[in-house]
Amino acid sequence: MVFNIRKFHDMRIDNDLSQKKMSDILGISEDIYSNQENGRSNISVDMAVKFANYFGVSLDYLLGISNDKIFKSDLLYDSLVTSDRLKKVRLKNRLSQEQIARLLHIPQRTYSSYERCDRTIPLEFLFNFAYIFNISLDYLSGRKNTEND
């Protein structure tokens, strides 16, 4: 499965919102929002969660992992929760940090820093992690408490 952010644009347009209005809703500058929506810069997990909360959709739907659209949450992103859940999934699958890093084609020290919450976790990394382990992005981001639904 390929990481795709097209639905950010499509949902904004379907709801007759300008990039300026969307950036105001998300609390970021219009330039930052435009660059993220158009793939010129990475979308943060925090921004994706705010976007999903505003439209009442799951992150899994927003990024094309699931067709289940409706998901109500007002929980904000908590990187400590995400770091803890990465570790729980890894341990549940009896894998080392090195094995996870190889699966995801990243350096082991980078993965380790995600588990320690020493580094910002990219949305694309979470997407790949969720896809490989068949778990919900909403679970990883802390928006729900179960891995799958």
Image (cartoon, rainbow, N blue to C red):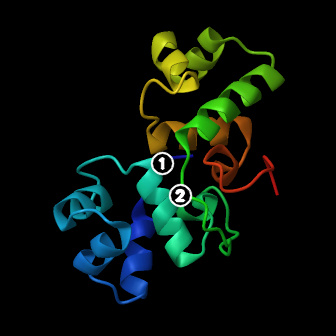
Residue occupying the point 20% across, 67% down: 30
Q: Which amino acid does the dot numbered 2 rest on?
A: Leu
Asked if the residue under mark 2 is in contact with the one under mark 1, i.e. CB atoms within 8 Å, the reply is yes
> Horizontal and vertical percent for residue 85?
69, 35
> Horizontal and vertical percent for residue 65?
63, 55
Residue occupying the point 60% across, 21% down: 103
Q: Which residue is mark 1?
A: 3
Q: Quadrant of the C terminus?
A: bottom right
Q: Residues within 10 Å of mark 1 (few under 14, many from 20)?
A: some
> Horizontal and vertical percent for residue 42?
33, 46
Q: Residues within 10 Å of mark 2 (few under 14, many from 20)?
A: many
Q: Secondary structure at mark 1?
A: loop
Image quarter of residue 67: bottom right
> Horizontal and vertical percent for residue 24?
29, 74
Q: Which amino acid does the dot numbered 1 rest on?
A: Phe
Q: State how far apart marks 1 and 2 are (Cα).
A: 7 Å
Residue 4 is at least partly visible in this image: no
* 85, 5: nearer the viewer: 85
Image quarter of residue 132: top right
Q: Is residue 84 above or below residue 39?
A: above
Q: Is residue 116 left or right of residue 15?
A: right
Residue occupying the point 60% across, 9% down: 98
Q: Is residue 129 left or right of residue 125?
A: right
Q: Which residue is mark 2?
A: 63
Q: How many marks?
A: 2
Whichever of callouts 1 and 2 sits on the residue coming sooner in the sequence is 1
